[in-house]
Image (cartoon, grey):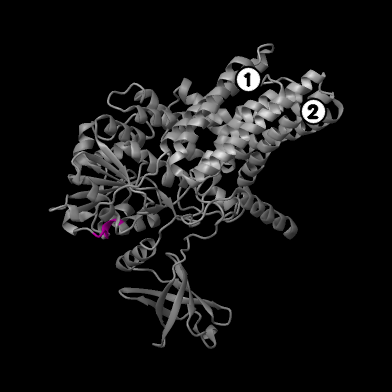
Amino acid sequence: MFGTTLDLIVIGQKMILLAGILLFIIIFALIVRKNRKLLKYFIALAILIQVVYMLWRAIFTIPTHNLVGLIFGSLLFLAELFALIQSTTHRLMFMRDYHQEVKDLSVFKELPSVDILIATYNEPVEILRNTIAAAVSQNYPRDKFKVFVCDDGKREEVRQLTEEYGAVWAIRDDHNNAKAGNLNNCLKHYANGELFVVFDADMIAKTTFLEKTVGYFIDPEMSLVQAPQVFYNPDPFQNNLQLYNVIPNEQDFFMREVLARRGMFNAVLNVGSNAIFRRSAIDAIGMIPVGTITEDMATSMLLQAKGYKTIFVNENLAMGLAPESFSDYVTQRDRWCRGNIQVFKKWNPLTMPGLTFMQRLIYFDGVLYWFFGLQKIGYTIGPILFLLTGIAVFYSDIFTMMLFFVPTYYISSLIFTLFNHKNRTYVWAHIYETALAPFLTVSALSELFFSNKVKFSVTPKGGNTDKTHFAFRVGLPHIILLILSLIALGFGISKLLTDTNYMIPVYLVNLFWLLYNMIAIIIAIIACFEKQRVRTSERFVIKDKLNLLLESGQVVSVNLIDISMKGCALAPSVPLDNPDQFVGSHVTLKHGTLNLPGVFYRSRSWGQKIIINFSPLSNEQLTHLVNYIFDSQENGYGGFNEKSVNFMGSLREIISKWWKTILQR
């Protein structure tokens, strides 16, 4: 069996000790749920358990009798060391509740002048039109703000569009330093306001953006007010996994939760858009920094090192487009990964004068995060290597390993739940990171050691896909990992059934580890099936009562079901008689000052639902429509404000959708 009677006694003692530790953790967690003031002590316990685990790992578990095992074992230990730093930073940031004070424009005797800078290069004019329309219609004195379209593409159609809306077309002769150079050019040669806002070309601001952000600049030390990037279309995970209203946008966890907690330590990260700056503070750091492909991180860090304050306003004040394909998503994250490492090498937060300890730790953690690919690859290869070759990357008897590892993992997952994260679970974090791991491993290591010059690439926005296809380039690494995992699974089951009894627990642990990784790999492969996106304009659900003016002059009371920039769905208060007679006729949708001309496209459910396609709109009409739609949006796509993501529910939805797809074929 497992050896001598003495061995069995030792194993029993370890399992009893493990059960006691887990019971203590569970009871402590239940107490913390009732009394949040004790959370800091629970966090201290978690850090202590993790430190003890890492000391045990360093002294006893790294294999030294085999070179391959030593290499991969050392990499795995290094990955866990990174995880210790990151988890500790995360726990310190979320240890206390934090609520940002609200300040409106009433704090000023005289409002400051504001420049709104819209950075564009090659984005479709149709997308840019909505952004400009929203920017020029801010609820702010019109003589106190100007809009500048920073067009690095020098396109004639953009010049015409800019002039139509009374904005300023800001151009330059070169494209040096990409977006940072584009913005600096506008600041040097066009803009002269006391404050300035930066929007990406697809970010549609609410009319209240300036109302909700300018007030914080009553503090003369305030340099940056950052609002979250919120997205109104499904990201590649939501779309390709067909989990449209089941999971939030992948970025929501950082944009709505992490950034808010960074604000508690004056470590707010500028995320490149939806930010308002004090011009004199930017001048004090020598303009927006150049020399990296992520100028936003450097900007906020340099401001904070100068002693300026930064604040995060956790409210949806502007909405944009998420990457629409998994390939574009990978390209975007590759740029962010390389850019953050470039900033770290040029402006090391650990040595930069002026930063506090927590600011240094948070920025270092932010850079360290981009090496998660290396961590995930190490975690994925570990069980495959052992089951295929017998080479261990983790040297320990199984029961001692469980004694140290299980409490570490369990208390970490409990803390994650105690923080009440709505936008992320432990398992979904595992899936997101696994999906990107092969690519960001290459990105991080090549940028760290070789400093390859990478061209700044704008994330494509506003495209659509007329048919489902598999993105083979980004799916191939996961296919290889899945094949290796399946082979290892077969080997593992065979060894489990034929090897000596004392090896059974070892194989069981490795098989569990392997299957856990395989779930994420399979979901990543499914995400590489780029699902059809034929809708060129996203629909928004808005509950409202409107009037529909028919071509005959009849006014019909209707309830708005959903609306887009192209049309809307309406439910008449009284179903229309013979609704097909109206098909093709001209109608007008009326709501206060909102008058939108359109064409009666079709009816459904015997006149209980009608579809209207809007006719070409004037600039004034389009501006009204943009403001009407986006001012009413409180959350991003999926509406994750009052609900939380649930992995098991997500998994059931994935299985259900794919089973239906198989049956249909």
Badge 1 element:
helix
Residue at x 70% of width, y 56% of height = 661
Image side of residue 3 versus residue 134, left or right: right
Q: Residues within 10 Å of mark 1 (few under 14, many from 20)?
A: many
Q: Is residue 383 above or below residue 210?
A: above
Tag 1 or tag 2, which sits nearer the N-term?
Answer: 1
Mark 2, residue position: 504
Front of the two marks 2 and 1 = 2
Q: Quadrant of the N terminus?
A: top right
The one nearer the camera, 404 or 572, is: 404
The amino acid marked with disc number 1 is Gly
Residue at x 67% of width, y 25% of height = 401
Q: Is residue 7 above or below residue 612?
A: above
Q: Is residue 180 above or below residue 570?
A: above
Residue 27 is situated, as x and y percent measured from the top left of the image, at 57, 40
Q: Quadrant of the C terminus?
A: bottom right
- Asked if residue 212 lies in the magenta stretch, the reply is no
Residue 565 is situated, as x and y percent measured from the top left of the image, at 42, 64
Name the magenta segment's main secondary structure: loop
- Span shown in magenta: 135-139
Residue 374 at least partly seen: yes
Q: Residues within 10 Å of mark 2 (few under 14, many from 20)?
A: some
Q: Tell me the CA gap for discs 2 and 1.
A: 22 Å
State the mark number for residue 399.
none
The amino acid marked with disc number 2 is Ile
Residue 471 is situated, as x and y percent measured from the top left of the image, at 61, 43
- In the picture as drawn, the residue positioned furthest to the right comes out as 498
Mark 1, residue position: 73
Q: Are marks 2 and 1 in contact (CB under 8 Å)?
A: no
